[in-house]
Image: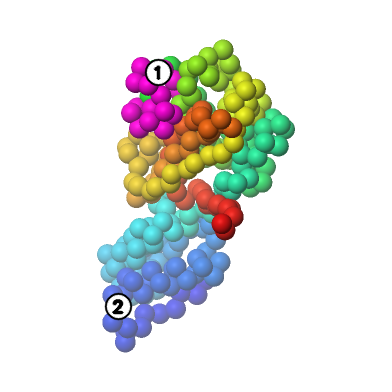
Amino acid sequence: MELGALDRADDRPPYRQIADHLRAAIERGELQPGDRLPSEAALMKHYHVARMTARQAIQELRSEGRVVSEQGRGVFVRQAPPVRRLASERFARRHRDAGLAAFSAEAVKSGFTPSVDQIEVSRGLPPPEIRERLRLPADAPVVIRSRRYLADGRPVNTAVSYIPADIADGTRIAELDTGPGGIYARLEERGHVLDRFTEVVSARMPTAAERRRLDLPPGTPVIVLVRTAFDTTGRPVEVCDNVKSAPAYVLEYDFPAR
C-alpha cells in the first residue's frame, strides 16, 4: 500500500493529510473491508509525526464511519453493507406466497444468512404516536412483537411491530413463530389484503441499550425507520418501528415520476 509523504507546502494539518492518504487507499481498494489499518506506531514512523497526530488521523476516519476500532486488535476498514434494502421489492406478495418474510427475501438477494432472535410478544396499549398512526382509540390494545435481525450472525436491525389486537387475536401474529411469510402473510389470511406502505426515515445516535443490542462501536449512528402498512380499505394494520445499524444498510427506493 502506497501512503505517500506529507506535503510541507500544504497548509492543512498533518493529521488531515494522513487521513486523506488512508481514505484514498480505502477508495482505491488497497485497503479492503475488514483489513487492518497501519498502527499508530507505523504511521508515526512513516510520516515522522507524533503519536497524537497519528491518532487524530485515525479518529478522522472513525468519525466518518470508514473504520472501526476493536479493543486489543487494532483499527479496521468497516465491512461493506451486507443488506441492500429495496423498498419496492421487499414487500412483494410473491415473497409471502413463497413463505419468505421481507428480511429473508433480502437475504436471498444480498447473499447473507438471516436469523432472528430476542423475540418477545406481548399485549398492551401502544405509545401515543403509534396509536395515532394506527388511528386507534385511547383504550384499544395492540399486540406488540419485538425482535432482532442478524445478517451472518451480526446484529443489524431491531424491530417492534404494533398490530391492532382485534386483527392479531386468534392468529399466529400473537405467537412467537408467525409462520411462513411472517406477519404480513397472516394479515392477508385474516382478510386484510395489503395495499400500500408509508415509511418515515431519520437518523440519530443510538441509546446505550441500542448500542448493546446492535453491538455497535462507539460513534456509530443508527437509521430509524417507522413503517405503516395499510390494507385495501385504507385501514392501517401495522406500525413497525425499526432501528438499523447505519453502516449495515443501503436503503434504496424506486418510485414513479408522477
Q: Residue furthest top?
A: 170
Q: Position of residue 229 (x, y in %)?
A: 52, 34
Residue beneath the point at 71% across and 31% down: 97
Q: Which residues are magenta?
A: 127-146
- In the image, 251: left or right of 221? right
Residue 132 is inside the magenta segment: yes
Quarter of the figure that contains the C terminus? bottom right
Residue 230 visible to an observer of this rendering = yes
Is tag 2's residue or tag 1's residue first in the polypeptide sequence?
Answer: 2
The amino acid marked with disc number 2 is Arg
Where residue 123 sits: x, y (%)? 43, 16
Q: How many marks?
A: 2
User: In this picture, is 176 found above or below 52?
Assistant: above
Q: Residue at x 33, y 71 (%)?
A: 16
User: Which residue is at the front of the view, 78 or 252?
Assistant: 252
Is residue 73 or residue 184 the one in the foreground? Answer: 184
Q: Which mark is drawn over residue 140? A: 1
C-alpha gap between disc 2 and disc 1: 60 Å
Question: In the rendered structure, which amino acid carries the disc numbered 1?
Answer: Ala
Task: Identify whether 145 is placed above or below 213.
Answer: above
> Which residue lies at the image location 50% right of the left edge and 48% below the top edge?
248
Labelled disc at residue 104? none
Query: What numbered label is drawn on residue 12?
Result: 2
